[in-house]
Amino acid sequence: MKTWTVAKHVLFRIGQDPRTLILIVLTPLLFVLLYGYSFSSGRPTHLKVAVVNEDSGLASVRTAELGRITLTLSLGAKLVQSLDRELFDVVLHDKPDKIQEEVKAGKYWAGLVLPKSFSHALANEALRERGPQKTTYQGRSVELLPPETAEGALATLYLDDSNPVVTSWVALSLNEALTRLVAEQQATPTLKDPLDVHALYGGQVSALDYTAPGVIGFAMTLITIMLTVISIVRERASGTLTRTLVAPVRPWEVSLGYTLAFALVSLLQLGELFLVSHLLFHIRFAGSPLLVLLIVFVYAIGLQGIATLLSTIARNEFQAMQFILVLLIPSIMISGVFWPIDAMPTNIRLLAWCSPLTYANSALREVMLRGRGISGVALELGVLAGFALLMLLLGVRSMRRQGYSA
C-alpha cells in the first residue's frame, strides 16, 4: 500500500508539470511518425540519375536473303521510357563527356550513357542468344541471322557507389530495365555484363564507411549537448552558476567561457572517436584531418548555443534529458546518416535541411569519403557558421536572462 502511495505521489508531481506531460505524450508519437514517413517505402525513391541517349535507333542486322538490312527500333528511347520513375528522377543530359565529372561532384547518383549504336548492339545480342528469326521487311519474309561476334557492353554507367544501399538499387533497377527490353526482342534475358560500369570508388566503400561520418557527428551532438546541458543545470541547481553570474563578469563572457571549454572537450572526443574508428574498423578517411577539425569545431559552437537554451528551459536534469532526446533522436532519423535525404518524402526532406546535423554529416562525408577540400564543403561550412553565430547570440541572451533571474 505504501508503494502505491509513493507511486501516486510521483504521478501527481508529473501531472503538475505541463512540460513533462507534453514530452511524455508527444515524444513517442514524434519518433514513430518520423520513422514511418522517412523509411516506410523500404527502398530509396527519387534518386537523381542523368541519361545521355545518343542512340540512333537503327540496327544493322544480317539476313539470309538480302545480306545486311537496317531496322528502325529506337531501343534507347524505349529503355529511358521504361525506367522506374518512382525510384529515379531522370534528367536527360546532352553532354556525355561531363557526366562522370557531375556524378563525382555529387550532382547525380548515376549517369547512363547510351551510345549511338545502342539499338544495333542490343538487337544483335538478342539475335545471338535466340538464334535465327523470321520477320517481315519491306513486305517480304526474311530470316534474321545472329552476329558473327559478340557486341560486349551495350552502354556505360557512371555510378556513385558511396552508399551501398543506393548502389545496389540503381544497378538492380537498370539491369531489370535492360532485361525487360531484351525480353521484348523475344530473346532469353541472359546478357552478360550489359553495362560498362565505372564506379567512383571501385566498390571499396562499405556501409560502415558511409554511415561512420554521420554516426560520429551524432555521437558528438549527443555527448556535447548532454554534457553542456547537464553541467549548466547542475551548476544552476547548486548555486554555482548564480554566484558566477553575480560576480564581476559579463553574461556573454560566461557564455563564451562555457562554449570554449566544451568546444575543446568536443575536439578531444572527436580525436578519440576517429582514432578508434580508424585503428579498429579501418574507416575510410580520404580528406584533411584539419578540415574535419574545423567542421566539428564550428558545429560544436552551435551545439553549445542549443545546450544553453535547453538549460534555460529545463528545470532539472531529468527534464533536460527528455529535451535532449526529443531534439536528437529525430535528427539522426532525418539527417541522412542511414538513408539518403533525396530519397525521403518532400515534407521530411524540408525538415532534414533544417537540422544542423544534416550539414555536419554532409560535410564530414564529403571530406572523409570523397576527399573534398574546403571549397567542396563551403556551403555546409557556411550554414554551420551561420547556425553557430545565431546559437551563440541566443545562448548569450539566455545566459543574461539567467543572470537577471539570479
Image (tube, rainbow, N blue to C red):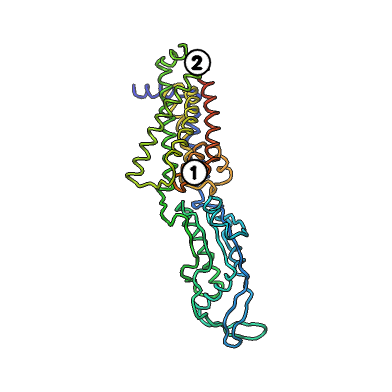
Which element carries disc 2, helix, strand or loop?
A: loop
x, y percent for residue 160: 49, 54
- Of marks 1 and 2, the one in the foreground: 1
Which element carries disc 1, helix, strand or loop?
A: loop
- Residue 319, can we see it? no
User: Which residue is denoted by mark 1 in the rendering?
Assistant: 373
Residue for point 38% across, 46% down: 283
The answer to the question of whether label 1 and label 2 lie on touching residues, with beta carbons closer than 8 A, is: no
Q: Indicate whether 348 appears above or below 165.
A: above
Q: Residues within 10 Å of mark 2 (few under 14, many from 20)?
A: some
**Left or right for 320, reference 113:** left
Q: Residues within 10 Å of mark 1 (few under 14, many from 20)?
A: few
Number of numbered labels in the structure image: 2
Q: Indicate whether 87 appears above or below 148.
A: above
Q: Indicate whether 34 appears above or below 249.
A: below
x, y percent for residue 144: 57, 82
Q: As drawn, which residue projects farthest toward the bottom?
A: 65
- Residue 279, can we see it? yes
Q: Indicate whether 194 appears above or below 68.
A: above
Quick one: 406 or 393, which is closer to the camera? 393
Image quadrant containing the N terminus? top left
Quick one: 89 or 195, which is closer to the camera? 195
- C-alpha span from label 1 to label 2: 38 Å
Disc ID at residue 250: 2
x, y percent for residue 122: 55, 72
